[in-house]
Image (spheres, grey):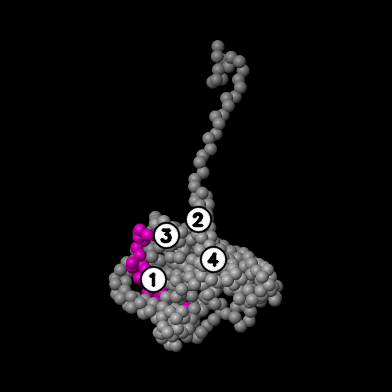
Amino acid sequence: MPESSTQRDLRLDFFRGLSLIFIFVDHIPHNVLSYFTLQAVGFYDAAEVFIFISGFTAALVYGRRLASKGAIYATAQVLRRAWQLYVAHIFLFVLFVAQVSYTAATFKNPMFNDEMRVADFLEEPHVAVVKALLLQFQPAFFDILPMYIVMLVIFPAVLIGLRRHWLLVLVPSALLYVAVQIFDITVPAYPAGHEWFFNPLAWQFLFVSGAVLAQRTAEGISLTRLLRVIYPLAVVVFVAALIVRASWTLHGIWEPVPALFLKELWPAGKNNLSPIRLIPFFALVLLVATHVQPNARFLRSAAARPLVLCGQQSLEIFCLGILLSALAHVILAEYGSALPIQLAVNSAGILVMVLTAKAIDWYKALDRMPVAPTQRAPAMAPARAPGVAPGGGDAR
């Protein structure tokens, strides 16, 4: 999905915005709308979309800065963005713990603390705070952002490697991914016995793959011939995965429907980004890149605009979606989960996310507008003595 230097590739914004909406929906337990998101029909879900596009856009944005202003400036910009994400993560953590704790106390339901994995914080907050600052304590829904921060911290090395040769980056990344799959290497988390849900040692391969694809297309390397060769295989993989995964979903709804290959393929591990998830996702990327062009008319339609705006304000909307998912869970747990209530809660959450993205976009647009020059009043002529000409001579 290349991005022109003069025109933003709205495909990236659209699909990232769609993934943020799906993440919000999927985070609400027993949500009926989750039957209409990616995880219901694919072995992958919105997390893969978000991380892949993040790697792609990072390579585009910081690759241009590396080319124009050098490695030191590009590295500083990447680390600055990582710091912004870190601050947002800590701020969100504080709000989330306060929200869950207040909810549990208000409704006298300590199960909310357990479900949201906040109970460990309440038991020993002095330790949990430090672990949160070290990204080791990750309550429910707090899995993606720490992993994304780690990806950005190592990204300067990836960026410089891409400038040398893309294989210098992709090969070590792939080898590390394979090692994780073979030896089940994990990253410990807090409390003891827990692990990072999104293992950065595995998920880095998806992030790096997006960056490599962006760098290759930005350099004008034509991938048309390669796409033609592997396109039929991608179609077969995508359709097969779609049928199998959809059968699992339908089996969960209506038991007589057979769950194809369930015993052979389950579980499709998300923690270490199982190849069962990764390969069909790459097939999806190829199909989307082939059939959705950068100038597709629907990307500039009024219907697509809300998703594009959410994708353009991804950090703010992601953080907001986390808080809204927790709030939606509380509402459905305390006031019932009948279909009308579920639809109302989902619609309200999505509406808040879209309106927030629109407000942020409006504010940033105002901030980018050039300041009109102020008209200064003409300077007053200095007073002169009677009979003196304006030039200083005698008028007489």
Q: Residue at x 29, y 72 (%)?
A: 228
Give the mark toward the camera: 1 or 3: 3
Indicate left or right for 180 with 90 as reference. Answer: left
190 or 21: nearer the viewer = 21
Crowd class of label 4 (few under 14; some 14 to 19; many from 20; radius 10 Å): many
129 or 67: nearer the viewer = 129
Q: CA distance from mark 2 to mark 4?
A: 20 Å
Provide residue 255's location: percent of width, then percent of height: 45, 83
Q: CA distance from mark 2 to mark 3?
A: 13 Å
Reading the chain from its start, which is encountered first: label 1 or label 4?
A: 1
Indicate left or right for 108 with 271 as reference. Answer: right
Numbered circle sitting on residue 304: 3
Crowd class of label 1 (few under 14; some 14 to 19; many from 20; radius 10 Å): some
Q: Which kind of residue does numbered mark 3 sit on?
A: Ala
Q: CA distance from mark 1 to mark 4?
A: 31 Å
Provide residue 295's location: percent of width, then percent of height: 35, 59
Numbered circle sitting on residue 285: 1
Residue 292 among magenta residues: yes
Numbered circle sitting on residue 345: 4
Q: Which kind of residue does numbered mark 2 sit on?
A: Lys
Reading the chain from its start, which is encountered first: label 2 or label 3?
A: 3
Provide residue 135's location: percent of width, then percent of height: 60, 72
Crowd class of label 2 (few under 14; some 14 to 19; many from 20; radius 10 Å): some
Q: Residue at x 29, y 74 (%)?
A: 229
